[in-house]
Image: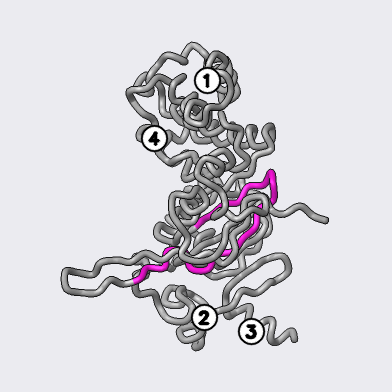
Amino acid sequence: MTAPPVIEARDVYKTFSIKQGLFKPKKPLHAVNGVSFGLEKGSVLGLVGESGCGKTTMARMILGLETMTNGEILIDGEPLSGLDRIALARRVQPIFQDPYSSLNPRKSIGSIISLPLRVHKVGDPNGWKKRVEKMMELVGLPPRLYHNYPSQLSGGQRQRVAIGRALIMKPEILICDEPTSALDVSVQAQILNELLDLQKELDLTYILITHNLAVVEHMATRVAVMYLGRVVEEAETATLFKNPRHPYTKALLGSILTPEPELDVPDTHLGATFPNPVEPPSGCTFHPRCAEVMAKCSTETPRPCMVGDVKVECHLFDREMQEAS
């Protein structure tokens, strides 16, 4: 009997009501529109897509910061709805994008990292300092910074404080929302490698939310590509980068800058505007921007297909499966 995934989403929806004006009725915005995935313990799922695709809303639901409109999220086989906030916080912790705003500037580093221990009343107060210093050493912070304040630290050190605070409760899952985008390029690689080392050492499971496909290729074991609230392609990282199936995934990978000086800035051929999520296109929501669009793309919604080990939502593969059968 195989163990259940450490985290699983089953047909998850999140709909917001958006005001259109003083005398106009509210309109629904389907931020997450039927997302499903499973993640094994010790793996890293990269959630990628343009801003507004729903990946951060998905993460907020996993953290219990947003309630689902429909569907189910399971942690070790237990429904998220059956866990209270304290129990969930012990098992799932976030690392936020901006270390400058996610830390209280009036609290010392020791106080910030020990806060979860105090809130959850874990362990003996007399042993908190020793536990925090051990965590600081684990994330690459010298213990002499215990009484320092965030303003006295560099950006990389602040993000290490945020990582230490997230890990002090020994969670199973970390939600990393653009964990290096606010840092200098010279520091980003250090933090990413440190996160990988911690993941292997502590057997952690990561959900990595990022726009940076190079980060995903470096860290993730599996990638889910989101577009307007849907996962349009999901595959093992090596498979997806070697042979992307969905036209949107191909466009994203085609947008990666190369160090070769003779090559110009790549053109994604997606246009300059993102569709209005309040009034999404009919049929396949990607069809107005798709280079391989067909007649039925504007009228029929594609269904999920398995092409080998790759899950993809595209009429191109509907057609392939029909021809194969």
For image coordinates 69% across by 32% down, the residue present is 201
Q: Disc 1 marks which amino acid?
A: Leu
Residue 52 x/y as whole percent: 40, 60
- Give me the C-alpha separation between circle 3 and circle 1: 55 Å
Whichever of labels 3 and 4 marks the residue nearer the N terminus, that label is: 4
- Give me the C-alpha separation between circle 1 and circle 2: 51 Å
In the figure, residue 109 lies in which quadrant? top left
The residue that label 4 is drawn on is: 102
Q: Are marks 1 and 2 in contact (CB under 8 Å)?
A: no
**Mark 3 or 4, which is nearer the eye?**
4
Closer to us: 299 or 35: 35
The residue that label 3 is drawn on is: 319
Q: Disc 3 marks which amino acid?
A: Arg
Whichever of labels 3 and 2 marks the residue nearer the N terminus, that label is: 2
Whichever of labels 3 and 1 marks the residue nearer the N terminus, that label is: 1
Whichever of labels 1 and 4 marks the residue nearer the N terminus, that label is: 4
Residue 134 x/y as whole percent: 59, 19
Q: Are marks 3 and 2 in contact (CB under 8 Å)?
A: no
Residue 152 x/y as whole percent: 37, 19
Local secondary structure at mark 1:
loop
Local secondary structure at mark 3:
helix
The residue that label 2 is drawn on is: 301
Q: Compared to 39, does 174 lie above or below?
A: above
Q: Are marks 1 and 4 in contact (CB under 8 Å)?
A: no
Q: Magenta span covers which residues?
A: 28-48
Protein image colouring: one colour
Local secondary structure at mark 4:
loop
Q: Compared to 321, does 116 lie above or below?
A: above
